[in-house]
């Protein structure tokens, strides 16, 4: 079921059906593995427009296929790593400018 829903999602792009997204997220959350939960989070971010669907949908489909086809811990861990790389990173905080003159060299006039 998860695999078929992911395939449907890829075929619907760029107009994703909210019902397909909801059904896929529900199926992934019921499966409950770390990979399934990571995929569910990325599907949510794709639906919200925070992750580019052209980049995310192929790994989502691959991860869903891996979930139903193998129980090899190494394969699941590798797939989770690939899915985790899709997670948006927060912007870096601005660097605070350091003074050109050390404070101990500053004197009153």
Image (cartoon, rainbow, N blue to C red):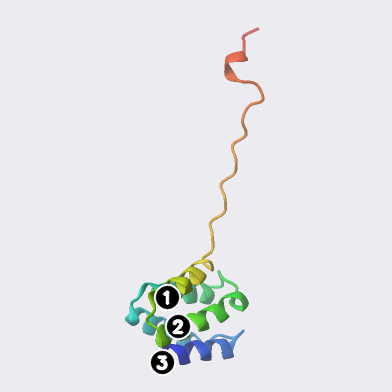
Q: Residues within 10 Å of mark 2 (few under 14, many from 20)?
A: some
Q: Is residue 97 above or below residue 17?
A: above
Q: Residues within 10 Å of mark 3 (few under 14, many from 20)?
A: few
**Disc 1 target residue:** 76
Quadrant hosting residue 71: bottom left
Pick whichever, 107 or 42, lies toward us. Answer: 42
The picture places residue 35, in percent across and down from the top left corner, at 41, 74
Mark-to-mark CA distance, 3 and 1: 18 Å
Residue found at x 57% / y 89%: 12
Secondary element under disc 2, as helix, strand or loop, is: helix
Residue at 47%, 86% in the rendered image: 65
Q: Is residue 34 left or right of residue 14?
A: left
Q: Which residue shows up at 55% across the image and 85% down it?
A: 16
Judged by depth in the image, the label closer to the viewer, 3 or 1, is 1
Residue contact at pointers 1 and 2, CB within 8 angstroms: yes
Residue positioned 45% across, 83% down in the render: 66
Q: Is residue 73 above or below residue 8?
A: above
**Closer-to-camera residue (60/18):** 60
Q: Which mark is residue 66?
A: 2
Q: As displayed, is residue 95 above or below residue 2?
A: above
Mark 1: few, some, or many residues within 10 Å (few <14, many ≥20)? some
Q: Secondary structure at mark 3?
A: loop
Residue 19 lies, in percent from the top left, at 45, 88
Which quadrant: the N terminus? Answer: bottom left
**Measured Cα–Cα span from mark 1 to mark 2:** 7 Å
> Which of the marked residues, 1 or 2, is nearer the chain's N terminus?
2
Question: Which of the marked residues, 3 or 2, is nearer the chain's N terminus?
Answer: 3
Name which quarter of the figure residue 56 lies in. Answer: bottom right
């Amino acid at each position: 079921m998860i695999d078929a829903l992911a395939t449907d999602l890829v075929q619907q792009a760029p107009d994703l059906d909210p019902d397909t997204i909801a059904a896929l997220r529900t199926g992934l959350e019921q499966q409950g593995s770390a990979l399934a939960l990571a995929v569910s989070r990325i599907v949510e971010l794709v639906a919200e427009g925070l992750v580019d669907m052209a980049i995310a949908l192929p790994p989502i489909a691959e991860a869903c296929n891996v979930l139903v086809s193998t129980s090899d811990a190494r394969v699941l861990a590798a797939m989770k790593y690939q899915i985790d790389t899709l997670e948006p990173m927060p912007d870096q905080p601005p660097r605070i400018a350091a003074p050109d003159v050390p404070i101990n060299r500053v004197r009153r006039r």
